[in-house]
Image: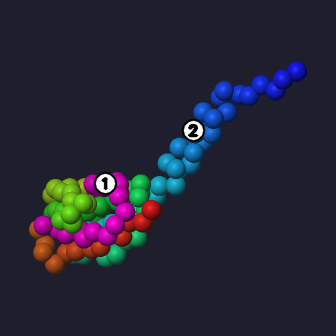
Amino acid sequence: MPLRKSVLGPAFGAIALLAAAGASAAEHTVTMAGSIYGPDILKAKVGDTVVFDNDDDMSHAVFVPTVGHGVDLGTQKGGEKRSLVLRRAGRFEVECVVHEDMKMVVEVSR
């Protein structure tokens, strides 16, 4: 009797790989208080999410001016959170438009 190959085998393998890739993404919280980002340097991977948590009583505005990574998350009032999914490897600076000395660096690896 000839052996029958399962048609579903490759499909299940692909689904498992996709699930594993999604499961490896991490979430990193960056706090904003006293005109300081915490941490001031964040190391993350492509696919991770950065949550900017304004736990301050003043507004902050998250802006990334680095070419290829540029994004403007807008003004966040105290208590608000905004998320940024990291889509490409590289190093970029995050600034607060409201407070010119409030900066941090994000290093994204594969």
Residue 15: which disc?
Answer: 2
Task: Write down the region rendered in magenta.
Answer: 81-97
Q: State yes or no: residue 60 in magenta.
A: no
Quarter where residue 19 is shown: top right
Q: CA distance from mark 2 to mark 1?
A: 26 Å
- Report the side of 1 relative to 104 (left or right): right
Residue 83: which disc?
Answer: 1
Q: Position of residue 104 (x, y in %)?
A: 27, 74
- Report the side of 6 relative to 61 (left or right): right
Nearest-to-viewer mark from 2 and 1? 2
Q: Position of residue 43 (x, y in %)?
A: 40, 70
Quarter where residue 12 is shown: top right
Can you name the residue that lies furthest to the bottom here? 101
Q: Earlier in the sequence, mark 2 or mark 1?
A: 2
Q: Position of residue 35 (x, y in %)?
A: 20, 74
Quarter placement of the C terminus:
bottom left
